[in-house]
Every structure is written in structure tokens, then in C-alpha cells.
Image (tube, rainbow, N blue to C red):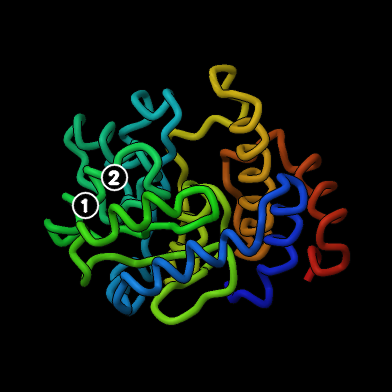
Amino acid sequence: MNFATFEPVYEAVIADFGFDRAADERARDAAADLATPFPLDRLGDWRGETVAVAGAAPCLADEVALARDADVVVAASTAADVLADRGVAVDCLVTDLDKNPETAAELTRDGVPVAAHAHGDNLPAVREWLPRFADEWTLATTQAAPVGPVRNTGGFTDGDRAAFLADHVGAAELVFPGWEFDDPAVDPMKARKLDWAARLLRWLERRRDERFAVLDGRREAADAALRETLGDRFDD
């Protein structure tokens, strides 16, 4: 995924939520000042493999086997801690630093890649935590246009960004333990973000010509929303 392709979706997301693009760019620029380049070929052993994109929903505890049986495990946020507690090591953590930055910092020091995301609402966390990460294992990301060492391989929430990252580096199959789009425990803002995550996974599913079981029952609604957002580009 390149930014030119992703940008119409990004613009739709920030319009829907009322986010400030300039704020995203300020956080991105702060990350660029703190980060060093992370060559994505360091993730080359994901190519051609089954990658588990682990979400942090409560059902992850019952779906650990799906992660354990995958070739590569990419965890969204606190999914890394749930999996570690059950003896499953992660190969990458994707986070916007809002819940478990200590875990993220420790993973980088142990030589595990962390995709640390900078956006308009987490500039203080970016400034506080990126200096604590091991530089060579930190991939700084943005949802705005990439600059310097800061990359954008697509996605909005931690979970769908993890899926887009896996796709970008050549994963053969994606599986999704720990995902729940209709989690009644989340607040309305999180519910809207999960709805967007479903739309973006549907877009990715179509681009990959793959079927993600986690989207069963949601495709029709996601397609309608994406066509409204992307028009003819959705069917490209």
C-alpha cells in the first residue's frame, strides 16, 4: 500500500471523526525527529507465510491456538500481553502507545520490531516513549503522508494497520484471532473506530483476493460504505 492509494481513505476517516490533519502531521514530524530508518526487509521472513493479526478483544483468550499455529504473530496493542501470558511470543507489536508502551519498549530492547504510530492525539506519548525504544527495532508510522523514516503502509486502528503491514511485506495468508467488531463493552468512539477497521479489512481482503473469516456477515455493509468513500477506486 502506498500513500497515494491510501490517501482518499485517510481523508474520509479524518472527515468522519473531525480529526485535524495538521495535528497528525505535527505528531509525524516529531516521530521523524526521534526515529531512525527501519528497512522493511527486516520483516522479510513474513513473506509467503501465514500471519496471525492478533486483536485485543476479550475473545483472544479463547483463540490463542490460531496465533500459536501461525508462522508469524503480529499483535495489536495489549494483545501482545495476553499472548505472552499464554506462552505465545509475538514477532511484532503495532501500537499507538496508548495502553502498553512499557511492553513496546521492552520488546524493542529484546530485538522484536514495534510499529509505533504517531497521530494527532498522541504527540506527548510519541515524545515520551520513542526515545526509550531501541532505535533499530522501531518502525515509526503515520496515517498522514510519510516523511523521512516515518512510514505509512495503510490502516487506521492498531489492528488493521497490523494487517496492512503484513500485506505490505508479502504475507501469504492473514488470520485474525482476538477480533470483535461488535464488542458491547467499548465506548461509542471505539465502536466507530472498529467499524472503520472492518471497512479497511474488507478493502484489503478485496485487494488480496482473499477471504477473512472475521468479516463474515459484514461484507455487504462494508462494501456499501467503501463505495461511498472510494467510488470506482474500490473496485480497482
Query: Percent from the top left, x then y, of residue 145?
Result: 58, 73
Query: Percent from the top left, x then y, of residue 155?
Result: 57, 57
Query: Percent from the top left, x then y, of residue 189?
Result: 63, 32
Quadrant occupied by the N terminus: bottom right
In the displayed structure, 186 sits above or below 27; it is above
Number of marks in the rendered image = 2
In the displayed structure, 187 sits above or below 204; it is above
Quarter of the image where one finds residue 127? bottom left
> Farthest top residue?
184
SS for tag 2? Answer: helix
**Residue positioned 68% across, 57% down in the render:** 203
Q: Name the residue under label 2.
A: 101
Badge 2 vs badge 1, beta-carbon distance below 8 Å: yes
Query: Is residue 71 among what the camera can see?
Result: no
In the displayed structure, 134 sits above or below 39; it is above
Query: Which mark is drawn over residue 105?
Result: 1
SS for tag 1? Answer: helix
**Residue positioned 32% across, 49% down in the render:** 70
For the residue marked with disc 1, what is the amino acid? Ala
**Is residue 166 left or right of 23 when viewed as pictured?**
left
83, 213: nearer the viewer = 83
Q: How far apart are marks 2 and 1 (CA)?
A: 6 Å
For the residue marked with disc 2, what is the amino acid? Pro
In the displayed structure, 229 sits above or below 75; it is below
78, 165: nearer the viewer = 78
Query: Percent from the top left, x then y, of residue 236?
Result: 78, 71
